[in-house]
Amino acid sequence: MKHAVVITSIFPPTAAVRQWRDMDFGSLIVVGDQKTPAPWSLENTVFISAVAQKKLPFHIISNLPWNHYARKMIGYLMAMSQGADVILDTDDDNFPIERYGVLDQTGIYPVSPQNRGFVNVYRQFTDQFIWPRGFPLNRIRSENTVIQQTEWQDQAVTTGIWQGLVNGEPDVDAIYRLTINSPCTFRPEKPVVLDKGTICPFNSQNTAFFRDAFALMYLPAFVTFRFTDILRGLVAQPILWQAGLRLGFTGPTAFQDRNPHNLMSDFVSEIPCYLNAETVIELTQSAVRPDDSISDNLFRTYEALCRQDIVPDSELVLLEAWLKDCEANITST
């Protein structure tokens, strides 16, 4: 399979970008922004500068806000246009480690029970009290969100997305960082797959999307920075189920040396995560139709989110452009 690694980077070059380049895992695409110093280049790397982005033929270009994480979608589309079968999504403060790799899309993996609602997959890989960003706060202390080892059953399953865990500074919310703030080293346990009706937030830190699920890489651009990839991940899961695909989690395959953050600003940016996670799942499940495509179900879900004022009307305009670009670039390869 042909792989592409897409990194968003404000201040390249960084050691992480170079390490991804040296892994030679596939095409490496770095998406800059107006804050990114220019000129910049790195051998065997595709760097899409702000100037270069304006000249690209993608429909989303005219609708994407500047200096926003969602501009990373330009890199996804570039990877699609190059014929990628798998797109690896990461950031410029995440380093691949020796065991890095993408598992097969179809195989026999430990699969969770169905219809468990929100579960804390982090706890399958550590005994530490820790939870992923986007996990409903009212469920954090519930032991019902931890799946026991005896409940996982080996089954043949097809994934659409693999989320790799990250050592050092895993993706947790500002409440965790403001209170506990302990680094984490996850155990390299067997990968696990969540069955239909069983949900865990996932992020853009260390994530692989297969071609079937490329449309679900859409990053909402008109929500807060700390909500954008979490909203993407929540919306994706019921749509995956309807398409016969699943979300899987692997043990740690990367390490984060986190860029500087203002934790109180992060907290404010995460408020929509705290308030809306369960509602997003309910709305998506209600919007999904069994015989429709992933793209149609995605658009219908965002229409429902818009009616509930979780996203604004401008999100639908950008999403429509994204789906046009996906159709053009996936089918052209």
Image (tube, helix red, strand yellow):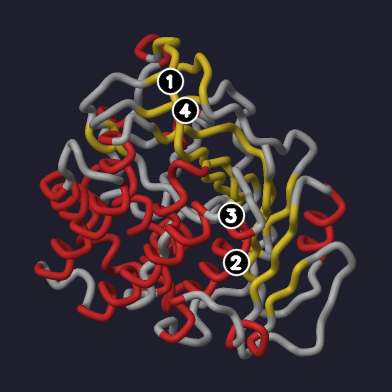
Name the residue beneath numbered marker 2: 75
The N terminus: image quadrant:
top right
The local crowd at label 1, few if under 14, some if 14 to 19, many if 20 or more residues have their Cα within 10 Å, is many
Query: Which numbered disc flags the more N-terminal residue, 2 or 3?
Result: 2
Report which quarter residue 167 is drawn in: top right
Name the residue beneath numbered marker 1: 157
The local crowd at label 4, few if under 14, some if 14 to 19, many if 20 or more residues have their Cα within 10 Å, is many
Q: Nearer the viewer, mark 1 or mark 4?
A: 1
Disc 2 versus disc 1: distance between alpha carbons?
29 Å
What residue sits 47% from the left and 25% below the top? Answer: 192
Check disc 4 and give the amino acid type: Gln
Task: Looking at the picture, tell me which residue is in the foreground, 111 or 4.
Answer: 4
CB under 8 Å between callouts 2 and 3? Answer: no
- Residue 178, percent from left and from top: 45, 64
- Secondary structure beneath dot 2 equals helix
Which numbered disc covers residue 89? Answer: 3
Which numbered disc covers residue 124? Answer: 4
- Height in image: 53 above or below 290? below
Q: Is residue 329 left or right of residue 267?
A: right
Disc 1 versus disc 4: distance between alpha carbons?
19 Å
- Residue 168, percent from left and from top: 65, 50
- Secondary structure beneath dot 1 equals strand
Report which quarter residue 149 is drawn in: top left
CB under 8 Å between callouts 3 and 4? Answer: no
Query: Which numbered disc flags the more N-terminal residue, 1 or 4?
Result: 4
